Structures are given as C-alpha cells and as structure tokens.
Amino acid sequence: MPPRTAPAATSTPPRKVPLRKLLRAASVACGVQFGWALQLSLLTPYVQELGIPHAFASLVWLCGPLSGLLVQPLVGHLSDRIGPAASPLGRRRPFIAAGAACIAAAVLTVGFSADLGRLFGDDVTPGSTRLGAICVYLVGFWLLDVGNNGTQGPCRAFLADLTENDPRRTRIANAYFSLFMALGNILGYATGAYSGWYSIFPFTVTESCGISCANLKSAFLLDIIVLVITTYTTVTSVQEPQTFGSDEAQNSGAEQEAFLWELFGSLRYFTLPIWMVLIVTALTWMAWFPFTLFDTDWMGREIYRGSPDNPGETQRYHDGVRMGSFGLMLNSVVLGFTSVVLEKLCRKWGAGLVWGVSNILMTLCFLAMLVITYVAKNMDYPSSGAPPTGIVVASLVVFTILGAPLAITYSIPYAMAASRVENLGLGQGLAMGILNLAIVIPQVIVSLGSGPWDQLFGGGNAPAFAVAAGASFIGGLVAILGLPRARIASSSSRRRGGTHR
C-alpha cells in the first residue's frame, strides 16, 4: 500500500485591488498634466519673448527627451530593485513624491525666470534678449522635464504592479491614468486660455514681468496647489503589493542589470510583437511632437498673423496663443471621453486596430492643418487684423478631434508594453523605461530638425506638420498590419486559455 501523502496546501490568491483604488492611484496624472499642459501651450511663446528666435525654439525642448532618455530608465531601474521593506511607502511611491516635488520647484523657477534674470542684470526693455532669464528658464525647464519623467514612469509601473499583469485591468488602469491626464489638460489649457490671472494675483506683475508673464507665473502657482492634492491622493491611495511578479527573474538578473547600457542590452531578447509596439510608438510620437511644440504658436502666427518679436503684432499673437489654449482644452474634453470608452473599443475591435485607425485620424487632422494654413495665407483679413471666424472654427475643430487619438497614445502603448515585457521577466519600471526610449528618440530628432526644416521652407510651422502627417500615416499602417488585434476575453475564458485574435 503506497504511503499516504499530505494534501497539497492551497494558497489563497492575492486579493485584487478595487478599481476605485486604482482610480485614486492614477490621480497624480492630473497634477502632472496640469503643468505639462501649461508647458505645451505657453512656454514656446514665452521663450520667444525672452529673445530666443523661432528657428531655435525647438532646441529648448531637447531638455525633455534628453532627460527622459536618462531619468526614466534610471528611475524605473531603481524602483524595480528596491525591496518592499526599504521604505514605508514601498518602491514606487517615493519616486512619485520626489518627482512631484521636483515639478513644483521647476515651475517656480520657470515662472519667476524673468524676475531672477533681472537680478542677473538683464535689460528688460521690450525686444531685448534676456540672457539671464533664458539661463534660469532653461534650468527650470530641464528640472520640469526631470520631474515629469521621474513621476509618470513610476506611476505607470505602480499601476502595472497593482493590476498584476491582468491585461484587462492593466488597460483599465491606463485608461484611468489617461482620464486624469485629460482632466489635467482641461484645467491647464483653461488656465492658459484665461488672460486675467494677473488681476487676481497682482503681486505677479513686476517691472521685468509684464501681463503675459504674470499670467504664466500665476498659472504655475495654481499648478502647485493641484499637484500637491493629487500627489497626496496617489501616495495614500493603496499599499503596494509585497510580492511582485518575476521576483526570481529580477533577483537572478541583479548582477546583469546596470542602467542605460543594460537597458539597450535587453533589446536582444525582444520578440517581434514587442518590436512592433516600439516601432509604432516611435512613429506616433514622431507625429505628435511637432504638434505639441508648435500648436499654439501655429495659431498665433499662421492663423492670427501675429509675432512675439514685433511689438505691433504681439497682441494678435497672444490672442492666437490663448485661442490655441482654448482649442487644446476642447481637445482634452474629447481625450477624457475617449478614455472612458477606450476599453469597450479595444474589446470590440482589438487594441492594434484601434491604435492604427487613431493614427490615420491624426494624419487627416495634420493634413487639414496644412490646408487651413494655405487658405489663411492666401486670404484677405479684415482691417482689424482679426482672422475670419471660419478659419478659427476650422482650427478649433482640428484641435478638438485630435483629442481622440491622443487618448489612445496615452493608454494603449503602455498597456501593450506592460503585458508583453512582463512576459520576459523584466520589471515594470524597466518596461516603462524601454517604452520611453521609443518616445524620446523621435523627440530628439524632431527637436534637432524641426527648426532648420521649417526655416528651409520659409520659417512657418507647416513643414513640421507635413512630417507629422507622414509619420502618423506610416505608424497607422504598421499598427493595422503588424499589431495583433487581441480582444479581451471574459474571466472564465481566460482561465480556460481562450484568447481571441
């Protein structure tokens, strides 16, 4: 008679984090994106006011991708390596809090750059180049991008940890993150579109900081308030899991993991589906970055025919920038709505197809901007100099429609990368760092090339948008043809191994 064996111990599966707590955990995206929206809508015009020519304004944005190339992989690497007992806040939340503090310091530096520049001896007469203010601005701008990258990467990894590699919950968590980004965008762009903040905060107006500068400074002070509230909500939302997927793989590869060189070294283990996600991500951001660089500048220059350099055209330029901020606020409303319905779209059509169609929609919008630019250039404006209503409405419609593909860009690539890289045994922090490479490298290319490229064709923004249209179209084709159209199965069918393709 064979010996009796003890019954196998049954292990209780870890309790899933409720969706309401995932929602709270994603809320920091609102505070971060509030500042990012102000950065996108107001800082390109502002830096030209300080004396940097339009042709070189894009070079300032090199700070973002370069810091992202270094900071996000490093932060992801460190947060993957930290044990859950190393900090009472776990391994992700200390980096989220530190990144938020860096953002707060950065926006104060950028907002008060004109005042600090005057202390360094800047000439504050209109039209003069303020070298001191530019230097302070660049320091603050770099810190702002360091904070953005140091916060968003760990937050994405935090959400991936909480969803425990469940594809559906990972997609929902990233949709929550995208929803809060939309809310932050709405607040940020609405704040940037309002021109009366200087009267509410009169102390912001100084001899070196006029009305438009004071509005920028006031907006960043409001951003700090929102950032503190949302960071506290995220950090106190839920305890981090005490065990993480692929712990053994992380421990066995501890000697191999180094930092950026190890990040590149891990590329040789990537499967074709991961490479397709990275390629489509790179092409998508090659398309988005010209728009994020020059959206409000395009509205001020091409549509309102203003200029930040010519005193006679400055008011029209700022009117255009504020109208562009209003368009981006409408864009964010659509972004938020799309984030809510995105899970259903992916379940019905598949993530790859949804991503590809959104890129084709981007192409149509960028082509529409080229047509609007041509019509506005060859149109007679009224004697007041105000653009015709039809041109402004058409521009706002394009800005608004672009909110839908932006929501998909903020969500689907991260969810697809998280699930595919996790299957290789890599940590979620490293996964976000890898995806970030596909974002920042195109940004470096656009930052270096867009200014000279625009100057080659007369100095407008239209050539950069032509490149954006081409990149988004190719990215859309690659996504439709190369990405799997995986649909979300029910919980029972997933347990039976039923994945639909």
Image (cartoon, rainbow, N blue to C red):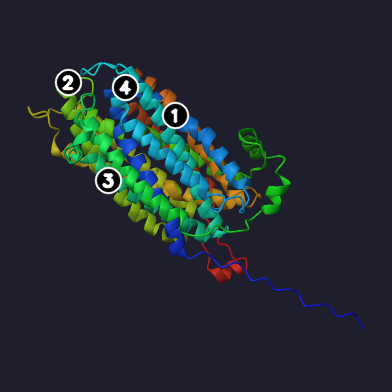
For image coordinates 31% across by 22% down, the residue present is 117
Q: Is residue 382 visible?
A: yes
Viewer-side label of 4, 1: 4
- Amino acid at pointer 3: Met
Give the image location of residue 393, x and y in percent. 19, 42
Neighbours of disc 2 within 10 Å: few (<14), some (14-19), many (20+): few
- Amino acid at pointer 2: Pro
Considering the numbered disc 2 on the image, is that residue within a helix, a strand or a loop? helix
Considering the numbered disc 4 on the image, is that residue within a helix, a strand or a loop? helix
Give the mark, 2 or 3, whose residue is nearer the N terminus.
Answer: 2
Residue at the spot of label 4? 117
Give the mark, 1 or 3, whose residue is nearer the N terminus.
Answer: 1
- Snapshot quadrant of residue 391: top left
Circles 2, 3 touching at the beta carbon (< 8 Å): no
As rendered, which of 210 and 374 lies closer to the eye? 210
Neighbours of disc 1 within 10 Å: few (<14), some (14-19), many (20+): many
Considering the numbered disc 3 on the image, is that residue within a helix, a strand or a loop? helix
Find the distance from the CA under tag 2 to the CA under tag 1. Answer: 29 Å
Label at residue 311: 2
Above or below, 424 against 367 in this view is below
As rendered, which of 406 and 121 lies closer to the eye? 121
Find the distance from the CA under tag 2 to the CA under tag 3. Answer: 28 Å
Residue at the spot of label 1? 63
Give the mark, 2 or 1, whose residue is nearer the N terminus.
Answer: 1
Neighbours of disc 4 within 10 Å: few (<14), some (14-19), many (20+): many
Residue closest to the far left:
383
As rendered, which of 344 and 380 lies closer to the eye? 344
